[in-house]
Amino acid sequence: MKRDDWSGVSGEDRVSQSEARWEKLKHNRLRCGIDGEMEEANVEDILDDWFIESLKTYKDLHVYQLEHPTQVIEWTSGKTVCVAGYGSSKNEVLELRLPLKLFANENKGLCAERDFKVVHGGFADGPVRCLRHVPGTRCIVTSDGLSSNLQVWDLGGDDSDVIRRTGSVKGRTTASEGVSRIAARPSSRPHILHGALSGDIQLTELTSGKTLYKLETDSADPLSSLQFVGDSVFLAGCRNGNIYVADTRTSSAPQLSPPPASSGESEPWWTDASAGPDPSSCRVIRLSLSGEAAVSDLRNPGAIVSRARLDVQTHCRCSSTDDVGLSLAPALDCIAVSGLGRAVQIYDTSVWRPEPQDALPLFEHRGHEVSSRQSDEGSVPALVTSHVWHPDRPRTLLSAAADGSVHVWDWVDRSAADAPAPGAK
């Protein structure tokens, strides 16, 4: 495993690199001075321009290189994440600790911990297509996409650095209908919601394997997302744009909302929703392959509050719908979109209106495209395979790409930084 660092974009340590990154950059004829000055030595202009631009657009930027790419990034704490490979044979399952320099409030240049660190690791016999951490435990649950059954793992602790498989969870169907989506109950109870189709969703108690709830519906729509929006209420987003809202405490029929009216033909949709104790504060976002985005209220998901046409047409199409990511920011009126191109795009939803309008990204993370060009000249830039927002840091995200790169970055809102101060003329 190779560890890189493009971090420290503040003070005298603005473009310092770890030893591994330094050697790679020298190999590619780019010399970076530790005093913040960069000299170009016959390298593509796009790489040089991006590095200079990053000094203004990132507060922090750190890079890690996996041996094999991942489609999953899952928080296990505020400073650790789980990643896993999706190759056809044996794959690593790793818990990584983020660089401690990222969390240093002052004197970042004095912080020696600049790299990601593997704190626990293990191996899965097959691909890992979905991964969820169970809150309040050292347990994760995964789906390999080969069957509806799930795999249960112990992440280890202070006395062991090995991630071990400890059991399995049986799905409702015997054959695979795609990747089973997994949602962990936000309370301390070790319950997971899972299913690959709308008609297969069930709630299972991990300790006993007992089925506690089944979604009763005649449909069998492939799922694109599954998540709790409260301790008992969940939302299931379907690939065709339908969404189901249901309560695990009752056997009542779920609330069904069809996809927003779209100018395009039948196409895939992705869904995300915010969570909270008050349904009035929960938002739902849906995005189509053509870039049609719509925001609604959880209490009435069929009523569109605001919408926009996102600028995804200029990006290359994803090779797999499982690579597309859509997420609402926990603390901002923003969404992040990845997998439709080679960048992670961030959009400001606070300026959207009920009438359709074109929207440009507020920010684009192009680091994966740039690093893949730099590491393998002449190759096709890597597509982004996953991203997640940090649960507590408003503008910090992690992202991964098909070349095995993993980035953690804290972006700067240039529109706010460039805005005149109140009372200024």
Image: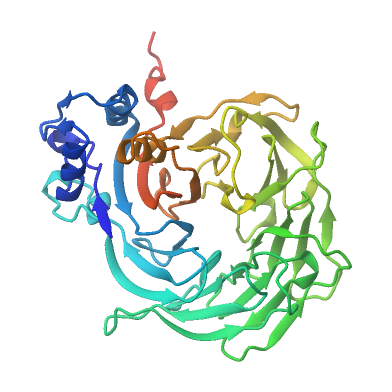
Name the residue: 41% across, 70% down. Answer: 93
Most extreme residue toward the front is: 378
Judging from the image, the colouring scheme is rainbow
Asked whether the viewer can see residue 282, the reply is no
Name the residue: 16% across, 33% down. Answer: 32
Tell me residue 373's x, y (percent). Answer: 36, 36
Q: Is residue 107 left or right of residue 143?
A: left
Q: Is residue 246 above or below residue 175?
A: above
Q: Which one is nearer the viewer's eye here, 27 or 66?
A: 27
Q: Which one is nearer the viewer's eye here, 376 or 150?
A: 376
Q: Which one is nearer the viewer's eye here, 65 or 185?
A: 65
Q: Is residue 158 left or right of residue 256?
A: left
Give the image quarter of residue 96. Answer: bottom left
Tell me residue 380's x, y (percent). Answer: 45, 37
Q: Quadrant of the N terminus?
A: bottom left
Most extreme residue toward the bottom is: 208
Q: Which one is nearer the viewer's eye here, 45 or 337?
A: 45
The number of discs equals: 0
Tell me residue 175's x, y (percent). Answer: 73, 75
